[in-house]
Amino acid sequence: MAEPASRPGPLRHLVLVLGDQLDAEASGFDGFDPGCDAVWMAEVAEESTHVWSSQPRTALFLAAMRHFAQALGAAGRPLHYTRLDDPGNRGSLAAQLAADIARLRPQALVMTAPGDWRVLQALREAAAAAGLALDVREDRHFLCSVREFAAHARGRKQLRLEFFYREMRRRHGVLLTPAGEPEGGEWNYDADNRKPFGPQGPGFVPPRATFEPDATTREVIALVRERFAAHPGRLDSFAWPVTRAQALQSLQRFVDERLAGFGDVQDALWPGEPWLWHSHLAAALNLKLLNPREVVAAAEAAYRAGRAPLAAVEGFVRQILGWREYVRGIYWTQMPGYLERNELGAHEPLPAWYWTGDTAMACLKDAIGQTLEHGYAHHIQRLMVTGLYALLLGVDPKALHAWYLAVYVDAVEWVELPNTLGMSQYADGGVMASKPYVATGQYIARMSPHCKGCRFDPTQRTGDRACPFTTLYWDFLMRHEQRLAANPRMALQVKNLARLAAPEREAVAARATAIRRGEVAGA
Ligand code: FAD
Ligand code: SF4
C-alpha cells in the first residue's frame, strides 16, 4: 500500500489502528486532521504466532485490514501501512511501531483502547521508549464502559449476568414497554431456548450470507497459505464478510431469515451442520465492522414489526447486550491476574487431536472438524463439547485458552479468555459462572444424534464402550467432591456420587487415568 506523499509540516498525531479496530468512527479518529495526522496499521507475524493462529483466523484479520486500509485511502486519510510480506517488516507491533516512530517522528500517538491487555502493554512500552505520549481513548463500540462495569461490580460478592443484563436493558431502553417494564413481562426467555431438533433434524435452514473472495482477499489467502503453511485450519471455503458493507449484508440476512428461528434450538447440535440458526456475526462485531447498537436495534425492530417472536429476539439481544458486554467487563476488571487463574489445579496437556480432529469421539470430531474448516463452531459446541471435554479431562486452562484464541475467526482475547477460563473451565473459581458446567455424554445424546454414530456409549461410565465424557464426569465429581459439595448448585450432582460403591469408583478412576494416558483407543 502506497505511503502518503511527504507532508510539508511535522506529523502531529499518528493514530494506531489494530486489526480488530476497523471502525472509521472509532474514538481514535476524533479530531483527525488529514493535514497533520496520519493512520498507522501493521500486519505482523507475532499476532499469528503468539498463539498458533489458524489460517482462517489470520486470513480474516488480514483481508479485513486491507479492505479497511482501502476505505481509509478512499476517505482521504493518510495511512502508513506495513504488509506482512514487506521487506523490513519488524515482526511485532511494538518493534514495527518503534521503527515507524523513528522514521515518521510524530509528536504523539493516539489510539482507541485495544482489546488485549498484552497489546496495550506492548504499545505503551514502545511509546514510552520513544518518549512519546500515547493517548488511549475509550472504546465507544461497547455499550458499557469498563468504568461503568467496575461500578456495577463494586460491592457485589458474585457477578452474575442476569442483574447486569437487566441494568443494560433499562439503561439502553431495549425491549421495554412504555412503562419501562420488560416486553412480555419477563426479562429472560432462556427456558424456551433449549430444545433439541426432532429425529428429522434441523430441516431447511436459510443459508448464511457468504462472500466470494475478491482479488484482495485472494492475495491474502495465498500469502497465509504460504507464510503459515503449518498452521491449523483450511481456507478452501473462506467466505466471511471482510468489509463493513458485507457485514451489514450478513446482519440483514440473519435478521430477515434466521432471527425468528434463533431461540428455540439455540443449544441443539446436528452432525455436519455448523451454521444452523445462529447469526455468525461475532467476527464482524469483534473486528468492529458492525456496531452492537445497530445489531440490537435491527433485532428489536424485527420484533416490533411482528417479524420475529419475543423469545427469539430477547434470546439474541441477551447475547449481545448481555453476555458480550459482561465478558468484556470481566476481562478488563480482572486482568492481568485472570490469565493465571487455575482454581481447579488442572495441569493436563491439551490432547494433540484438538489441532486435527483426529478422534473417534463423534461429537468432538464433528465440532473440531468444522472449526478447522471454517474457523467457526456455535456456542454449545464450544461450551459443552470441546470445552466440557477439556474441563473433565483436567486440561491446563492456559493451554486450552491458547487453542480457543487460535482456532476461531471471532477470537479476540477480551471475549475468548473469560468464556474459556471462566464460563467453560471454572478456572476463575466462580467469578463468571456460579458452578462448573459439567455433564455426562447423555447431555450430548439429548441435544444431538452424535452418539448413534459413535463407537462409545453415553450411558456407560466403565467398560470398553464407556463414553469418555461419562467416565470423566464421574471422575471429575470424585476428584473435586469436597469443593463441589460446598456449592449449593452442585449439591444434587455430588449427592449422586453416593450411588457409586468403592469398586465402581476405582473402575471409573482407572479408566479416567487410561484416557489421560492415551491408552483408550479413539479417545
Ligand atoms: P450467536 O449464537 O448468533 O450469538 C449472537 C452473538 O452474541 C454472537 O455473535 C456474539 O457476539 C454474542 N455472544 C453470544 N454468546 C456470547 C458469549 N458467551 N460471550 C460473548 N459474546 C457472546 N465469542 C467470541 O466472540 N469470540 C471468542 O473468541 C469466543 N470464544 C469462546 C470460547 C468458549 C470456550 C465459549 C464457551 C464461548 C466463546 N465465545 C466467543 C462465545 C460464543 O460461543 C460465540 O460468540 C458464538 O458462538 C459466535 O457465533 P455466532 O456469531 O453465530 O453467535
Ligand atoms: Fe460424544 Fe460420548 Fe456421544 Fe460419542 S458417545 S458422541 S464421545 S458423547
Image (spheres, grey):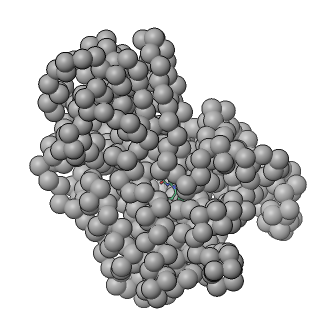
Instruction: Please count the marks in the image.
Output: 0
Q: Is residue 85 left or right of residue 234?
A: left
Q: Residue at horizontal 86%, vertical 50%?
A: 482
Q: Looking at the image, can residue 378 be seen?
A: no
Q: Is residue 140 left or right of residue 461?
A: left
Q: Quadrant of residue 6?
A: top left
- Residue 74 position in % (x across, y down): 18, 44
- Residue 288 position in % (x across, y down): 39, 50
Q: Quadrant of residue 22?
A: top left
Instruction: Name the residue at the left extreme.
Output: 215
- Residue 391 position in % (x across, y down): 63, 51
Q: Residue at horizontal 56%, vertical 73%?
A: 315
Residue 180 lies, with reference to residue 170, above or below; the image says below
Residue 221 lies, with reference to residue 506, above or below; the image says above
Q: Looking at the image, can residue 341 be seen?
A: yes
Q: Quadrant of the N terminus?
A: top left
Q: Residue at horizontal 20%, vertical 39%?
A: 76
- Residue 338 position in % (x across, y down): 65, 37
Front residue of 236 and 258: 258
Q: Residue at horizontal 14%, vertical 30%?
A: 2
Q: Quadrant of residue 464?
A: bottom right
Front residue of 184 and 328: 184
